[in-house]
């Protein structure tokens, strides 16, 4: 049994109907025995003396194997935005940041304004919640800690960008900054179901 690394128990039926019991094993090692009419004995670290009795009186062993539970880890594909989409959105936020910092009519720090807008959208786009810390934008780079699809990330950031610009009546001015970006990335976002002209309100 030890060579087979058996985990289970052996039912011992002796010639006498009043004798017998159970021998418990784990990975081939005996760890306990329960004989009829006696208390359970833990044999861990002790010699197994229960096997002597059947040799003397004769008996039958019924071996029952217990298959150990195997944890089946399903490798589900985590929702993670593609590098191409992230790079395009980084370009969008860089354009937006540059537009805000160069516009004298805009008061306040760009990151602060953006986080305030994110907060108003957190119910619909949970990953944008500033208090959750799942999304960060700094130095022109995006970091996303939560699981989001390309479409979810793009829609959330574009709605935020459109809101920041629209709240200040700067849609027309920002549209001019987006001309080259739109030409380069319009088809990319359309492939994930996002019509950028409509979401960014630059039609």
Image: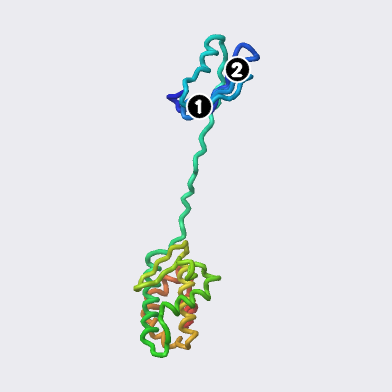
Measured along the vertical axis of the image, is residue 121 above or below residue 6?
below
Q: From the viewer's perspective, tell me whether residue 64 is left or right of residue 138.
A: right
Mark 1 burial class by Cα count in 10 Å: few <14, some 14-19, many 20+: some
Q: Is residue 111 above or below residue 12?
A: below
Q: Nearer the viewer, residue 159 or 196?
A: 159
Q: Which residue appears at 48% of the width and 77% of the height?
A: 116
Q: Quadrant of residue 57?
A: top right
Question: In the shown orientation, is residue 168 left or right of residue 11?
Answer: left
Instruction: Give the residue number, with chain letter if any, for mark 2.
Output: 20
Q: Secondary structure at mark 2?
A: strand
- Pair 1/2: label in front: 1
What is the CA distance from the residue labelled 1 to the residue labelled 2? 17 Å
User: What x and y, as percent, mark residue 91?
Assistant: 36, 75
Residue in the picture at 59% in, 20% down: 35
Q: Where is residue 175 drawn, in percent x and y? A: 42, 84
Which colour assignment does the render follow?
rainbow
188, 12: nearer the viewer: 12
Contact? badges 1 and 2 (CB < 8 Å): no
> Which residue appears farthest toward the right when viewing the image?
17
What residue lies at 44% left-to-right and 61% top-to-bottom?
Answer: 80
Element type at mark 1: strand
Task: Report crowding for label 2: few under 14, some 14 to 19, many 20 or more residues within 10 A (C-alpha).
Answer: many
The residue that disc 1 covers is 31
Q: Residue furthest bottom?
A: 105
Q: Position of residue 41 (x, y in %)?
A: 55, 24
Looking at marks 1 and 2 on the same chain, the residue that comes earlier in the sequence is marked by: 2
């Amino acid at each position: 049994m030890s060579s087979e690394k058996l985990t289970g128990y052996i039912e011992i039926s002796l010639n006498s109907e009043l004798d017998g019991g159970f021998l418990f094993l784990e990975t081939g090692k005996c760890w306990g025995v329960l004989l009829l009419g006696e208390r359970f004995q833990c044999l861990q670290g002790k010699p197994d003396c229960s096997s002597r009795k059947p040799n003397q009186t004769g008996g039958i062993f019924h071996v029952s194997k217990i298959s150990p539970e195997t944890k089946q880890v399903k490798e589900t594909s985590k929702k993670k935005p593609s590098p191409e989409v992230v790079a395009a959105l980084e370009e969008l936020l860089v354009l937006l940041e540059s537009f805000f910092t160069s516009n004298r009519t805009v008061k306040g720090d760009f990151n602060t304004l953006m986080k305030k807008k994110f907060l108003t959208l957190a119910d619909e786009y949970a990953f944008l919640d500033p208090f959750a810390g799942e999304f960060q934008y700094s130095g022109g780079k995006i970091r996303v800690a939560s699981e989001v699809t390309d479409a979810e990330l793009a829609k959330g950031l574009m709605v935020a960008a459109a809101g920041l610009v629209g709240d200040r009546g700067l849609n027309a001015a920002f549209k001019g900054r987006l001309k080259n970006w739109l030409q380069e990335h319009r088809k990319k976002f359309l492939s994930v179901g996002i019509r950028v002209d409509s979401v960014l309100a630059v039609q």
